[in-house]
Image (cartoon, rainbow, N blue to C red):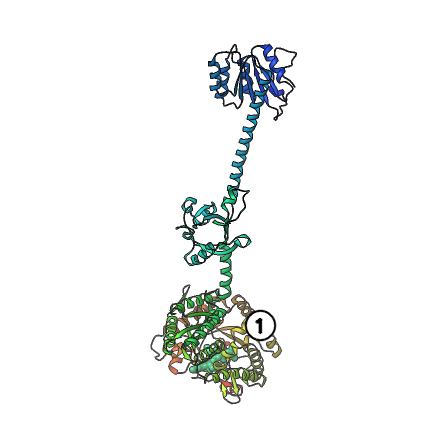
């Protein structure tokens, strides 16, 4: 659409919004107050690919300039209202990006100078030649196009520079360049985030200020090697130091590219590249700290015990192996120790696994304190620890360290308010005297440790070949005990419990004996702990239930159900799911009244699953079987258990009874136990009563049922039946002796 039709000499005001402006068509504003001249200008330029807009006075021109963008203004200076110079001032003031060609009839030089001063592209004097005008317009537009293209390219360059910088700075990796001296010439923003150094703190600095001291040598090696081509890139792991105040060092996998560039080649593309000159280093460093840490954690866990943080058995063997090699080379001795805690199982069973674990941690801590530099302490598992003392000067050193260990364990441990005492048995084997291989040394230290256990624990012993025999004896004992079950070598003995007032028998405790073919009668203290450790407790207990029921059938005829039988229940047996069922089945099968049976449990029976134990004991109680707490007062939390288990009877431990020497003295523990029983309405039995004084004291203070050598020793069934017959039993309900509250 043409805003100024050639037929209409006076251009109509035009509405720019009605124009579909083609952007690639230059837009020209033609300003002249002479309609004829304006028209001829219009006609001259028309049809040449320009978009033409006209104005016949200054105000009109300003209006157009304010609304539209023009590439070129052909401006007459002598306008009636606002002069051409003022129009140019307007253009300049408003920062309008249009070139101006002045087409003027003014002859004075001032007009031309004023126009050029105001930035006119050219000045044409009227009358102008058509060619000249067309050429000037063409040139102006061409120059303008070039300038615009330049600006566009400059802007594009600036943008792409921005983009590259953005990409480089937001790269997860550190990107850097070093000059030939190894000084930073560029480093991206990432370095700041990862290492805490600002860019300008690093530029110009040597890379070595960043590299961890221990890695400097390696860094120097890789940075100095100036390879080219495809061999130029390689991966090196370096630890970089963080800015002071910034956490820990981080590990980087830095991909280095030593670039060798030809300076001439860079600047003069058509010359042949000949001489390769070292220019600098370009590198990308990737932060692999997290991966390194994960790797470290994984390998740490493979070689360490999680609970105590000590080396585990794998790492221990490794260290021991190294120590043996070194000892062999230097012809020195070394010691291997095997430490096993005494009574640990008791703590675990009594206070539970959590406390047991805590104790192990505390023990590990104390043992660690006794070590010298270079010694290795490891946890083998359970409550077993091993130690290697390399480069032993003399055996006394090992002895002294073992003594230190024992002493450090001597102080009581505090497990959340529970004071726990523990000791250890330590076996020591010396290289090369006691063995030359890792396994031999460990095995012999283990044997020596068992020797200590067998001799009352809490001590240390050096290995001696004669100990092999003892350990063989242990194996033999296991085999013999299994045979004992098959050959029926076990037997139940019975120890009567007596009512002190009447002297009559009210009950009996069943105690196990082993009639060893060679050693004679063996007491349970010798073989039951062994059975517990070696998985024989369950078959032995099974056997016991059957034997007791068979025996009871025999003496029932003599005393009816007047005499109650106490049997000792192993914690392991209670732990087993079918104890209750077994017991009930046997009682049914033999027709024995459950009310005639009492099971004795020790306070230490708070086994792995106390809730389950309580359930079992409750079911027994519902059946009519009663429960006694054995060795009362020696365990950890006597009172707590009284409330947790359905208890009917407590037995005063013989160690307290043994204390009683003087009838008129005061024995607070005994009195306390008696008053607890009275307070809770429980039956009470004193164990291990050996003297009249003890019996009188107990009786005077309210304990009426006694068990001990003063009355009877444990005896085989036939003898027990004789005793029942001779001495008679308490009749009526008196066999249940209780302090009713
Ligand atoms: P316990 O349950 O405390 O049994 C009492 C121990 O004291 C018995 O030792 C008994 O012979 C002994 N004794 C009784 N009166 C006196 C006395 O006046 N003076 C002295 N010094 N000792 C006396 P025994 O028979 O050697 O049994 C030892 C432990 O073995 C028992 O201690 C019990 O914990 C366990 N035990 C015995 N028989 C069995 C059994 O059939 N099953 C289970 N699980 N454990 C048993
Ligand atoms: Ca007992
Ligand atoms: Ca006892």
Q: Examine the rendering and report whether any part of residue 573 can be seen.
A: yes
Secondary structure at numbered mark 1? helix
Neighbours of disc 1 within 10 Å: few (<14), some (14-19), many (20+): some
Q: Which of the pair 102/352 is nearer the observer? A: 102
User: Residue 241 location in percent, x, y?
Assistant: 42, 53
Q: Is residue 714 above or below residue 675?
A: below
* Residue at 58%, 18% in the rendered image: 132
User: Residue 640 location in percent, x, y?
Assistant: 45, 66
Q: Is residue 221 above or below residue 200?
A: below
User: Where is mark 1, residue-wise?
Assistant: 580
**Residue 491 falls in which quadrant of the image?**
bottom right
User: Residue 555 location in percent, x, y?
Assistant: 55, 84
Total labels: the figure holds: 1
Q: Does ligand 1 reach within 8 Å of label 1's beta carbon?
A: no
As drawn, the residue found furthest toward the bottom would be 518
Q: Which of the pair 678/448 is nearer the observer? A: 448
**Residue 701 falls in which quadrant of the image?**
bottom left
- Quarter of the image with the N terminus is top right
536 lies left or right of 709: right
- Quarter of the image with the C terminus is bottom left
339 lies left or right of 270: left
Q: Which of the pair 666/488 is nearer the observer? A: 488
Q: Is residue 343 above or below residue 145?
A: below
């Amino acid at each position: 659409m043409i805003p100024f039709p050639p037929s209409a000499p006076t251009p109509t005001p035009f509405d720019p919004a009605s124009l579909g402006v083609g952007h690639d068509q230059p837009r020209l504003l033609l300003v002249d107050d002479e309609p004829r001249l304006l028209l001829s200008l219009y006609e001259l330029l028309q049809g040449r690919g320009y978009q033409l807009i006209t104005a016949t006075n200054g105000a009109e021109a300003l209006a157009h300039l304010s609304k539209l963008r023009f590439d070129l203004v052909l401006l007459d200076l002598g306008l009636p209202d606002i002069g051409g110079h003022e129009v140019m001032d307007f253009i300049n003031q408003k920062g309008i990006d249009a070139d101006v060609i002045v087409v003027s009839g003014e002859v004075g030089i001032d007009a031309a100078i004023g126009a050029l001063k105001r930035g006119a592209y050219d000045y044409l004097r009227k009358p102008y030649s058509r060619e000249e005008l067309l050429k000037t317009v063409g040139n102006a537009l061409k120059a303008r196009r070039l300038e615009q293209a330049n600006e566009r390219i400059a802007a594009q360059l600036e943008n792409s520079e921005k983009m590259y910088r953005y990409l480089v700075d937001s790269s997860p990796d550190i990107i850097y360049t070093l000059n030939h001296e190894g000084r930073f010439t560029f480093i991206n923003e990432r370095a700041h985030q990862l290492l805490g150094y600002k860019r300008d703190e690093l530029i110009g600095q040597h890379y070595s200020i960043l590299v961890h001291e221990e890695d400097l040598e390696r860094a120097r090696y890789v940075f100095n090697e100036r390879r080219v081509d495809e061999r130029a890139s390689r991966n090196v792991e370096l630890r970089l130091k963080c800015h002071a105040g910034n956490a820990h060092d981080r590990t980087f996998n830095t991909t280095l590219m030593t670039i060798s560039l030809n300076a001439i080649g860079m600047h003069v593309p058509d010359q042949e590249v000949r001489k390769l000159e070292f220019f600098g280093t370009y590198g990308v460093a990737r932060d692999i700290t997290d991966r390194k840490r994960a790797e470290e954690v994984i390998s740490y866990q493979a070689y360490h015990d999680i609970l105590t943080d000590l080396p585990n058995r794998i790492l221990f063997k490794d260290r021991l192996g190294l120590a043996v090699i070194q000892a062999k080379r230097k012809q020195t001795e070394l010691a291997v120790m095997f430490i096993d805690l005494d009574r640990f199982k008791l703590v675990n069973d009594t206070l539970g696994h959590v406390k047991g674990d805590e104790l192990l941690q505390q023990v590990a801590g104390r043992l660690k304190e006794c070590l010298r530099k270079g010694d290795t302490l490891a946890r083998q598992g359970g409550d077993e620890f091993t130690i290697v003392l390399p480069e032993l000067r003399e055996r006394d050193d090992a002895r002294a360290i073992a003594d230190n260990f024992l002493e450090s364990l001597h102080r009581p441990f505090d497990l959340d308010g529970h004071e726990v005492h523990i000791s250890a048995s330590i076996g020591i084997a010396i290289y090369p005297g006691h063995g030359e291989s890792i396994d031999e040394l460990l095995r012999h230290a283990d044997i020596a440790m068992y020797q200590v256990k067998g001799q009352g624990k809490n001590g240390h012993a050096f290995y001696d070949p004669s100990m092999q025999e003892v350990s063989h004896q242990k194996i033999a004992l296991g085999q013999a005990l299994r045979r004992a079950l098959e050959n029926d070598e076990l037997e139940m003995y019975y120890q009567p419990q007596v009512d002190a007032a009447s002297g009559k028998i009210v009950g009996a405790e069943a105690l196990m004996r082993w009639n060893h073919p060679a050693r004679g009668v063996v007491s349970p203290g010798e073989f039951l702990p062994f059975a517990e450790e070696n998985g024989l407790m369950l078959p032995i207990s099974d056997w016991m239930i059957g034997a007791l029921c068979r025996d009871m059938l025999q003496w029932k005829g003599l005393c009816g159900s007047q005499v109650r039988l106490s049997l000792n229940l192993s914690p392991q047996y209670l732990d087993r799911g079918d104890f209750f069922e077994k017991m009930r089945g046997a009682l049914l099968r033999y027709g024995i009244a459950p009310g005639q049976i009492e099971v004795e449990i020790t306070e230490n029976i708070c086994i792995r699953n106390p809730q389950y134990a309580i359930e079992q004991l409750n079911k027994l109680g519902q059946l009519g079987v009663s429960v006694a707490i054995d060795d009362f007062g020696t365990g950890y939390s006597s009172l707590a258990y009284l409330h947790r288990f359905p208890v009917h009877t407590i037995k005063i431990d013989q160690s307290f009874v043994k204390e009683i020497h003087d009838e008129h003295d005061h024995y607070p523990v005994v009195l306390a136990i008696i008053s607890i029983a009275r307070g809770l309405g429980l039956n009470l039995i004193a164990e291990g009563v050996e003297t009249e004084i003890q019996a009188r004291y107990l009786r005077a203070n309210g304990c009426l049922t006694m068990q001990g050598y003063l009355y009877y020793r444990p005896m085989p069934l036939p003898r027990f039946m004789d005793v029942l017959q001779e001495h008679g039993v308490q009749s009526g309900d008196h066999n249940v002796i209780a302090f009713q509250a």
